[in-house]
Structures are given as C-alpha cells and as structure tokens.
Amino acid sequence: MSATQATPSGTRQQAEPDMARLDTLVFQAVTDVGAALNGALVLLGTDLGFWSAMSDCRPISAAELAATCQVPEPYANQWLSAQAASGYVDTDIDQQTGAVMFRLSPEQAMIFSDPDSPAYLAGGYHIVRSVYEDLPRIEEAMREGHGFGWHEHDAELFLGTEQFFRPGYRTHLLEEWLPALDGVHDALTAGAKVADVGCGHGVSTSVMAQRYPASTFTGFDYHQASLDRATALAAEQGVAGNTEFLKARADDYPGSDYDLICFFDCLHDMGDPVGALEHARSALAPDGTVMLVEPRAGDSLADNMNPVGRVFYAASTMICTPSSLAQDVGAALGAQAGEARLRQAAELAGFTRFRRATETPVNMVLELRP
C-alpha cells in the first residue's frame, strides 16, 4: 500500500497502514536487530573459546563453560542464553529443578566450531564486523561520490574473506569445479602453468597446489598484506615449492602461456572487469582456459530476492561496489552481476566460448576460452 494516496480534490493524504503488514515488518526488524547484536557474540564465542569448548556436542552448564574458558559465570550464562534464543545452541532443562544444560548439535558444531567444515560460517561474522568498523568512512565516500579501496578496509575483512570462502573452495574446487572444465584436470595432473588473479590470502591457490604438485601456481594481488599472508599459508600447507605470490593488478600481471587463469569471487570487485579479462586472454596459452567463479546470481532483482541475494547485495553495497568505484573505469558490476552481464564482459574482452560449467547453491563456475 502506498504511504500516500490522492483524494478526489487532487490533494494527497497519508494512507492508513496495513497493521498486519506492519506487525510482520516490526517482527522482521526486531529479528534482524537481534541477529546484528548476536553477531558480536558469535565472534566472542570464537575468540574466547566457547565454541571450541562445546565442540564435542556434550551437555555443559554455564558454570562449566565459564570454568573451562576462564571467564566469570554471568558472562557465560548470558552468552549461552543468547545462543539458545538464536537457535545456535540447544538446551536440556530439568523439569524439576529448572537447571539448564547447553549443547551443540552436530549441525551447529559444523557451522560454529569446526573451521574445516564445509558449513563453517564464522568468517562471515568477521566480514560483518569489518563493515561496521568501516561504516563512517564508507558513508563519507558515498556522500563525496568516490570509492573505497579494498586495501582501505579494516583487517577483519581480509581474515573474514579467507575464512568465509575457504570451506567452499576446499569442498568444491577440486572435486567439482576443476573437473567440470574441459581437459583442465588432466592438464593440471600432467603439469600446467596457472595464474590465480586477485588471490587474496591464497586459499584457492594452495588448495590447487596441494592436489596438483606437477603444476606451478602464481597468485597475483595488489594488496601486499594479503600476499604476505598467502605466502605464510602456502608454507604451512607444504606447497611453497610450487606456489609463488606476486604484487600486481589484474590488468598488468606478468607471464604468458598460462594453461589456466582463475578469478575466484573477485572479478565483480574490479574497476575494469573487461580490461582484466582482456589481459587474461592475452596471457593465455592458445588452448588455455579462464575459470571465473562468481556468486550464483540471477540476471534481475526478482531472481535474487532470497536470503543469499540479501547477503550479497549488502556486501556489494559496502565492499564490492566501493572497491570498483575506487579504481579506473569503475564498472561496479556488483556481487549480483548475473551470468548475462558476465557473458557480455567476456565477449567484449574477446572470448568466443562461454559456458556455465557447474554451480553450487552459492557460486557459479564459468568457463571462458578464446
């Protein structure tokens, strides 16, 4: 219902609100406020060891959690109660005494206490924290009409991005995404030359390097702190021998005859995605492949009116679009660019073959060839 409506005389008066709809919206807003507040508690649970202490899924009291994690019991009690109200922790209540025991279900443990789980989501909360840390400066950038570069963000964003995307890469990259590309698995097994553009902390680079020791992998990023972290992680994973991380932009990284060039969840952040793809095409071997991993978005707003779309539109407003606008061209594709706009960018860059090789509920994997 419109907020105002015309009267027969042509004047406008305030429309009466639909009280049922108002109740629904108030309930949603209250739910969202609770979620925003509890996001801080999820991070506290990670930092203070609460989630780890409950990872065995056995019942635990507030007093036991407090003693294990060496915090005052009232803190543990209120934290546990908030997680129970959020549905993130289960409760067992003694009907006679009222005593409450708390425990993680196996599913809750996968999300909050197991960093190696394909469903681990703590990284998302680090991203949320970074957004609030950066809010005043991003608001200023919007008011003044300019961008806000990736490197300008709070360091929580870089940690959160690593943790948020790592489960998907570990779960899908080797078993589903690479095998879906024509001939790429065999080429990597035999020994191929690979560029990982916009590699960030290099999680995707190291995952591939572990599986394909005969291939060489070079990660490129313009953010030196991320490259330093990528180098350290590669050493921890035992792949320093076939990985290298170099500072470069997406349109000027060195090398040629790459058998595979990858863009993992980053092309839409770039100021000139067409220019980045043009450079990739020029750096490919004649029979090389570009793997473009992007959020699985539809081509219209109506296609993306769902919880995943909500997350990516919000992240795009605060992270992806400001990043693109801080660069030359400032195309601002957004995190929900959709396949049609990505196909158009690839065709403008000179690629003649474009197909959706595979997808997950969150990502689509696009194969580009000259």
Image (tube, rainbow, N blue to C red):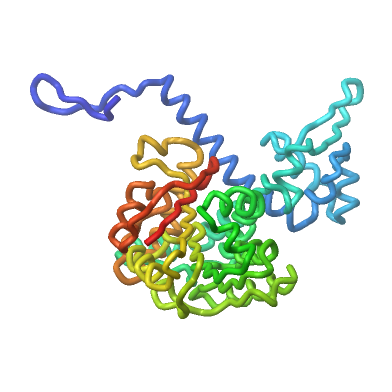
364 relative to 8 in the view: left or right: right
The answer to whether one can see residue 122 in this image is no
Q: Nearer the viewer, residue 3 or 258?
A: 258
In the image, residue 178 sits, relative to residue 29, either above or below, namely below
Q: Nearer the viewer, residue 346 or 13?
A: 346
x and y percentages locating residue 112 in the rendered image: 72, 47
Quarter of the figure with residue 148: bottom left
Q: Residue at x 29, y 68 (%)?
A: 329
In the image, residue 349 sits, relative to residue 67, either above or below, namely below
The answer to whether one can see residue 253 in this image is yes
42 relative to 91 in the view: left or right: left
In the image, residue 65 sits, relative to residue 251, either above or below, namely above
36 relative to 1 in the view: left or right: right
Quarter of the figure with residue 185: bottom right
Q: Nearer the viewer, residue 2 or 191?
A: 191
Q: Residue at x 43, y 53 (%)?
A: 316
Q: Quadrant of the N terminus?
A: top left
Q: Residue at x 34, y 40 (%)?
A: 300
All told, the count of numbered labels is 0
Q: Nearer the viewer, residue 348 or 331?
A: 348
x and y percentages locating residue 250 in the rendered image: 43, 71
x and y percentages locating residue 206 in the rendered image: 65, 66
x and y percentages locating residue 158 in the rendered image: 58, 65
Quarter of the figure with residue 370: bottom left
